[in-house]
Amino acid sequence: MAIIPILIGWPALMALVIPLLRDPRVRGRVVYGGAAVLMVLAAFLLGAWLQGGGGIVSLCGSVPLIDHLMLAGEFALMILIVVLSIKYKKYPVVLLSVGQTGLMAWSELTCPVESPTHIQLDCLSMLMILIVALVGGLICIYAVGYMQAYHQHHKDYQDRSGFFFSMLFFFLAAMIGLVLSENLVWMYFFWEITSVISFLLIGYTRTEEAINNSFRALWMNLLGGFGFAIAIVVAAHTLHTVQLGELVAAKATIPVVLLAMAGLTKSAQLPFSSWLLGAMVAPTPSSALLHSATMVKAGVYLLIRLAPAMAGNMTGMTVAFIGGFTFIAASMMAIAQNDGKKVLAFSTVSNLGLIAACAGIGAEETIWAAVLLMIFHSVSKSMLFQAVGSIENSLGSRDIEDMHGLLLRLPRLTYIMGIGIAGMYLAPFGMLISKWVALKAFVDAENYLLVIFLAYGSATTMLYWTKWLCKLVSLHHTKVKVTDATHPDQYLSMYIHAAATLGLCLLFPLVSSRVVTPIIQELYGTAHEVLSMSVLTTMAIMLVSVLFVPSLMFLLTRSTHRHYVPIYMGGINEGDNTYFTNSFGEPEHLYLSNWYLRFEFGRRRLMRPGVIISAGVLIVMLCVIIGGAV
Amino acid sequence: MKKLAKSPWLLHYDASSCNGCDIEVLACTTPKYDIERFGIINTGDPFQADILLITGGVNAQCESVVKQLYEQMPNPKVVVAVGICACTGGVFKDCYNIKGGIDTVIPVDVYVPGCAARPQAIIDGVVKALEILEEKRRNYHENKEEG
Amino acid sequence: MMPVISVLGYLLLAPLVGGLLDGLDRRVSARMQGRQGPPMLQPFYDIKKLFSKQMIAVNSVQMLLNLSYLVFLAVAGSMLFAGADILMCLFILSTADMFLVMAASSDSSPFATLGAGREMIQMMAYEPLTLLMAVGFYLATGSFHVGNIIRMPHSAVLVMPGFLLGFMFITAIKLRKSPFDLSTSHHAHQEMVKGITTEMAGPTLAVMNIAEYYEMVLMLGIVALFFLNEHWWSWPIAIVACLVVFLLEILWDNVSARVKWRTLLDGCWVVTLLTGGLNGLILMLVR
């Protein structure tokens, strides 16, 4: 298991080396190498872990030196935040940062707690490492080509690609550290690093909007971090332990509810969703990294860890309500968005809401669904972000309206988008099956409110994906030529993602029995089959049919002779399908718009009530739970 | 009656009619005349129509529209000119903007005279068109088999 | 053996039954309007004619998307008639619908796109009730499996009348009946021509029509699910109930005018909450 420090250290080392390289080509090669080595290391870890028989591996008994280094690191982060906050005149952030760092330092110095293990490798953290290393590594590879094109398009921004790549790798290191930490103090350290790096990445372009949004992300995440810090202090003083596993086993109410709150902020649940939506100003690879594979997954990872302690109590109900409410509210707001990345952001928030709701219920079935949702969501969403980023670089826009007829203009990217979208909501892809199990589990948990949230939320989810898909498949011939500016490395990453999406669905029964069941076993001690094998096999057959039927129909109808005629426009086409004669007798370009229902589902209409309701519920429940426990 | 004859669907287009004949065409769908008992449906969509029912003479502005609608109808298809204007141009024949009857633009199979054409006459014309439609269908399928 | 016969029966007979019902619908509608109406077999004449027409198209993918729509509807129906999971059946049903929406949008034409947009709104309007209904069956019978639901000692409708009411409400959308026939229309002179089917001609439209017949039988099958139980006499009752529901839909079609999408959405969601939502809540509380 000596490989674990290397796994954390390698991306950190890459983060230090990359800024020193000035030549973009050399830097690109180094990034390729770094990402490849990271993936290989993760694979090695998997191999070594499997060879050791899997199970729970505990490491790092007492390492005071590292503890002190981490404390120093926390102070360094605090100083960085304070300096930047003062520079940009965002003073409240200073209070949050100084407050929690001071709290942690005071607790560690006055009430030191002996920790038997700092690092623990089990099924769930192994799964997270694989997701982080593989998806994150591919995103780094994607970013090499993307950042070149990005800076060709946006000459007004200073090219800080070296810094950008450095931060990406640093982020991966922090993520791997986070999911491996069993000691909460360590986890808190990595947690803070991810907060700060996401802040730096969001502010990459240094425009006013980017800076404002990055500070919003920072204060919201620091607020969650504050909750985290208080949870540690409370746990250390009252229970004399800072081990996550022991806290969960003891079902310690106050630390668990505070940690859950930290998890909710990190996974951008209402009322904290706006940081993730604002984060879309950043270059796409960071969006893909922050909002698909890593950052937001850290939040739900923590929630899943806490799930056994939340089953059936007030904390669980609160988390489940916030999650379910976010699921439906975000999916409604996604309908009114025409910016591709915004839709993806809302969809991410919404899906994370579902995962949080599952974790809040805390039954075996819901955790099964939550873990599967997490796997499928990471891969599909990362692919969708990358595809939208590539489309933006080729079209110069990421407006869904501009993607009309994209199938004819950028066919390869459109197919990738299509697979991603289908994976997000269509029967019988993984997301939908997980939703199905979640629905059943919500009924069994007798939480009817969540059932209603899920029923309505599925309907709204379907609308925003379907209309996007329809925009892509409109066979609209335009005269404007589009050249595909996507680099081969970007395609490499996206193809692997697409293959993984399809492969995961085909191997669904295997993923369920080999990956998810052991995780449940570890969290709960028992695990029964959530879905019978025959159901899973039916699913695989259905999936094949979804791919197979249209292809078969294509072969069947290919040879039929058709007489092609123009579309119906009341007989006033100008000879082709793109122009018609208007009432002045002049040719007019046909423009077809999607439905956005802005007055009904717009962010302006729904965001504020959503934030007020969720914040109200959260505050009241926090008071009730903490008050009840004290 | 054969396949087509049992389910002829109409497309009704007003070229430059005074609306007199159009009212009569719509009258055919009312309970009193009820053309649906012959399986006739007024579709309003050239892609799904077998019979193109045109009222009024062709003018410069609608010439291309008439041609295009005719093009968009799948074979076999027939055209029925309803009312004297559609047949010959009627009283507007010599107007500066009128080209003449429908047959100046597309081939017409049945002419239904009248100003306005009576619903009975229109139904008669459509029934006559059905025979021609059936004939065309036979020719169409023979041609398809040959070529 | 039973499921195989039942599925085969559905696949072979559903178009026939659907066609006959459509013929009945047109005739009853005509009588309600004081007309004689077409012969009962008119839908079959129409389909026969459509297949004999020239294959015109505006693009190369419409036919294959329409065929996929047909196949998925048949699959969804087969799942119901095979006694499989009803939730999965409903999910596949919405996947099938999505192929129809894609077929319409692929034309990139104003009227078809308008129809596709409205069809999506319709899907959003009826989806919550279908999911809640599946949950209702689960609460009432303890299983999502159609095979188990029809072997209960009592008909499900006794404990879930609210769901039946809500389902009848949204069936108007699925059967493309007024007031909810927003996305396509059976009448000429509409603001959106033929909506999603505007660019479908000849055989393509015939495929779409056959698919609609499969869907009609599927919807009536779900209505029957409310009435079936382990006793043999529940079957004739179920069939009568289906016919009554169907005739009520026709009546509603003829006495109401088309509504705007906003009314459709609000109406369906509120009705869903009041019927399915309340009924489900009560079921959960008494469980």
Image (spheres, helix red, strand yellow):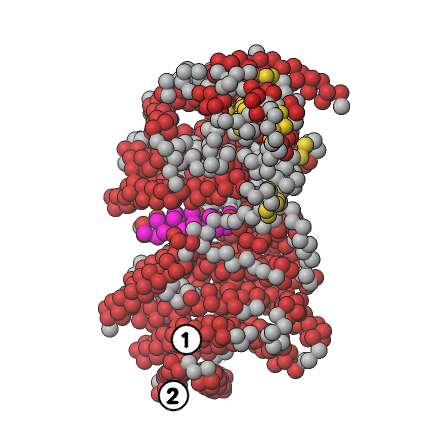
Task: Report x, y in % for residue B72.
Answer: 62, 31
Residues marked 2 and 1 touching at CB (< 8 Å): no
Residue C247 occupies quadrant: top left
Q: Position of residue A495 (x, y in %)?
A: 65, 56
Query: Which residue lies under the disc numbered 2?
Result: A109
Please say if A282 is above or below A588: below
Marks 2 and 1 sit apart, C-alpha to C-alpha, by 26 Å
A305 sits left or right of A484 in the view: left
Q: Is residue A190 above or below residue A294?
A: below
Q: Image height check: is C242 above or below C285?
A: above
What is the chain identity of the residue bearing mark 1?
A
Local crowd at mark 2 within 10 Å, few (<14), some, or many (≥20)? few
Please state which of the two labelled residues, at mark 2 or mark 1, is closer to the viewer: 1
Region rendered in magenta: A449-466
Evaluate whether residue B34 shows in this view.
yes
Query: What predominant SS class does the magenta segment belong to?
Result: helix
Q: Is residue A220 in the magenta section?
A: no
Q: Where A184 sits versus A573, above or below? A: below
Q: Is residue A147 visible?
A: no
Residue in view at x 41 percent, y 56 percent: A602
Residue placed under numbered mark 1 in the picture: A219
Q: Quadrant of residue B136?
A: top right
Q: Label 2, secondary structure: give it.
A: helix
SS category of the residue bearing label 1: helix
